[in-house]
Amino acid sequence: ADDQRAEILGSRARLEAIVRRPVLAFAYPYGQAEHFTDETVRIIQDAGFRAACTAIQGLLKPGNDLFRLPRCEIQNWDIVAFRKHLEWLFIS
């Protein structure tokens, strides 16, 4: 936990120095369920982040945990395939 906290806070400080703005969101490295724990989530919350993204596939829905947000995978699709995926995401 101490190593995670140090890495998270140190990385945030470096990013904020680069972008000269507060960094309010976090993305878990690799982001699958086995790559972070409830303790990691608490560290992120205690650090003052407003939300955190995982790499777990899913759609945003009302009631999603703001510190375990899912993502939709985007690949190097041609425009036809990309459109099909967008339609599936927003119409289904």
Image (tube, rainbow, N blue to C red):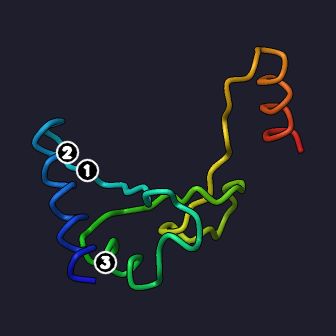
Q: Are marks 2 and 1 in contact (CB under 8 Å)?
A: yes
- Judging from the image, what secondary structure is the residue with disc 1 in? loop
User: Of discs 2 and 1, which sits in the foreground?
Assistant: 2
Question: Looking at the image, which residue is at 15% across and 60% down?
Answer: 10
**In the image, 73: left or right of 19?**
right
Separation (CA) of disc 3 from disc 2: 18 Å
Does residue 82 sit above or below 12 in this rendering?
above
Residue at 33 percent of width and 71 percent of height = 44
Disc 2 target residue: 15
CA separation, marks 3 and 1? 15 Å
Q: Earlier in the sequence, mark 2 or mark 1?
A: 2
Residue type, label 3? Ile
Quadrant housing the C terminus: top right
Label 2 SS: helix
Query: Considering the image in quadrants, where does the N terminus appear?
Result: bottom left
Is residue 60 depicted above or below 35 in this figure?
above
| Residue nearest the viewer, comparing 17 with 4 | 4
Per the image, the residue denoted by label 1 is 23
- The image shows residue 41 at horizontal and vertical percentages of 41, 76
Mark 3 — residue?
Answer: 43
Q: Secondary structure at mark 3?
A: helix
Dot 3: few (<14), some (14–19), or many (≥20) neighbours within 10 Å? some
Which one is closest to the eye, mark 3 or mark 1? 3
Q: Amino acid at mark 2?
A: Leu
